[in-house]
Amino acid sequence: MSADVLSWSQRWASRSINLRLLLAVLLMVLLALPVAGWLLSHHYRTASVNAFDERLEATLNVVIAGVTYDPLNQQLNYERALGDSRFDHVYSGWYWQITDEANRSVASRSLWDQRLPVLESERVTARTLPGPRGQQLRVVERDIYLAPLEAPLHVSVAARDDDLRENIQEFQQMLWLGLLGLGALLLGVLALQVRWGLAPLRRMNANLRDVEQGRAEQLDTRLPDELATLATSMNAVLARDQRLIERGRHTAGNLAHALKTPISVMRLLAKQLPGESRDTWEAELSRIDSAVRHHLARASAAGEGVRFAPVALQGTLAPLITGLARLAQRRHITLRQTVDSGVRVHMDGQDLQEMVGNLLDNALRWANSDVHIRLQAQGNTLRLVVGDDGPGMTPQECQAAVQRGKRLDEQRSGSGLGLAIVTDLVTLYHGQMRLQRAESGGLEVVIELPVVAT
């Protein structure tokens, strides 16, 4: 049970602020408006019924004032006109009636041969009861004492409450339609208010994307006070990270320059050694020099690839490919290239050149007569394919080739760091790389990088 509650809480915690506020507004409207509607409807119904009863009570007082008793004939008389013709029309819905203990009665002409039920009460009492021909009546009645009678008289005034009920029903319909419209208006206005209130957050989010894509260096602090403080703190974190990156790059550069002189001295000393020892020392010094250059290149990469401002793919690689094409021509190798023009990528230009340069250098070293390179954009993905018609590799050799310093043929020149450096750069830019057999029988390297600027 607790796991279910925790799961629900986790799902709710991931909901957007916009959705949370809209749900809160909707809940408020769904709770507040029905309660307000019920209270207004109840108050109006009570007020309408009370007003109707007061009108009947006023008529009741007029009827009481006009009743007399004839002792000689021992009968009740009523001769005063009420001024309302509805009391004279049969079954009009407006009636009055006076009865005594002996069931002698005087009634309005409208009652004809019908009589109203009697409820003895010294106080004015209002109630609803059925009347002639199924009419629903609202009755106001009370007991009075009239000299010289000792027993009380019961006086009743009744009227159909159709108009009252229709009036209440019309008010309720107008009320609920009005509340429905008000609810829709409130939801619309509050939704606009929520959207307007969250606009600085959306602007801040867009600003963050600009920083991530390399189009801006820091967040704009022209925001409301609460967000301006947050943006300032985030800018401080970004500046600190940038300082750490720059410090690491400078440290790596200083280390490389510090090792450069001792390596040069050791090369000079190695030339004075006998032949076999000299070759061994020069090979190891070349390995050290390549490792230093590799880590210096890694340190010069300023973090995640998607944070770089976009650079032109063709313009960045043109000098490199032109130079390697001349090298291929001297080796009697055909270099075929296909590069999408107009493509821009979020990469450091040096990283892009190092990746392509290492792959082409490796392909030219192993190719017999043909090397091809294709760079194509597929959505936001850059697809880089470099292949040759050399001897190729087995699956086991493909796996071993990406290990730093691993060389499959010790008779060929090189430090063995080429594919390992490419692997590191692919990982740095969140890409994928695979080695496979080319159609020409040699090795084909396929790299996919999510760096295309859209």
Image (cartoon, rainbow, N blue to C red):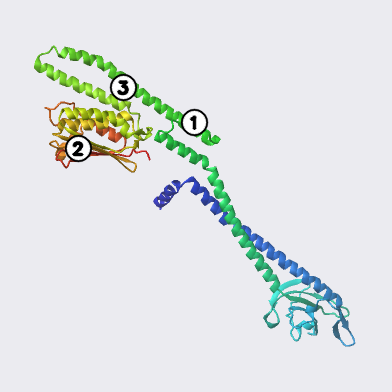
Secondary structure type for disc 1: helix
Q: Earlier in the sequence, mark 3 or mark 1?
A: 1
Give the distance between the C-alpha atoms of the residues marked 2 and 3, in whole angstroms.
33 Å
Give the distance between the C-alpha atoms of the residues marked 3 and 1, in whole angstroms.
30 Å
Name the side, left or right, on which 292 lies relative to 76.
left
Mark carried by residue 252: 3
Residue 233 seen: yes
* Mark 2 or mark 1, whichever is nearer to me: 2
Mark carried by residue 76: none
Q: Are marks 2 and 1 in contact (CB under 8 Å)?
A: no
Nearer to me, 40 or 316: 316
Residue type of the residue flagged with mark 3: Ala
Name the side, left or right, on which 300 lies relative to 146.
left
Residue at mark 2? 387
Q: Earlier in the sequence, mark 2 or mark 3?
A: 3
Vertical relation: 413 (above or below) 12 = above
| Residue at screen point 31% across, 26% down | 299
Quadrant hosting residue 209: top left
Residue type of the residue flagged with mark 1: Thr
Quadrant hosting residue 273: top left
Nearer to me, 75 or 312: 312
Mark 2 residue crowding within 10 angstroms, few (<14) / some (14–19) / many (20+): many
Give the image location of residue 400, x and y in percent.
17, 35
Secondary structure type for disc 2: strand
Q: Earlier in the sequence, mark 2 or mark 1?
A: 1
Secondary structure type for disc 3: helix
Residue type of the residue flagged with mark 2: Gly
Residue at mark 1? 232
Mark 3 residue crowding within 10 angstroms, few (<14) / some (14–19) / many (20+): many
Give the distance between the C-alpha atoms of the residues marked 2 and 1, in whole angstroms.
49 Å
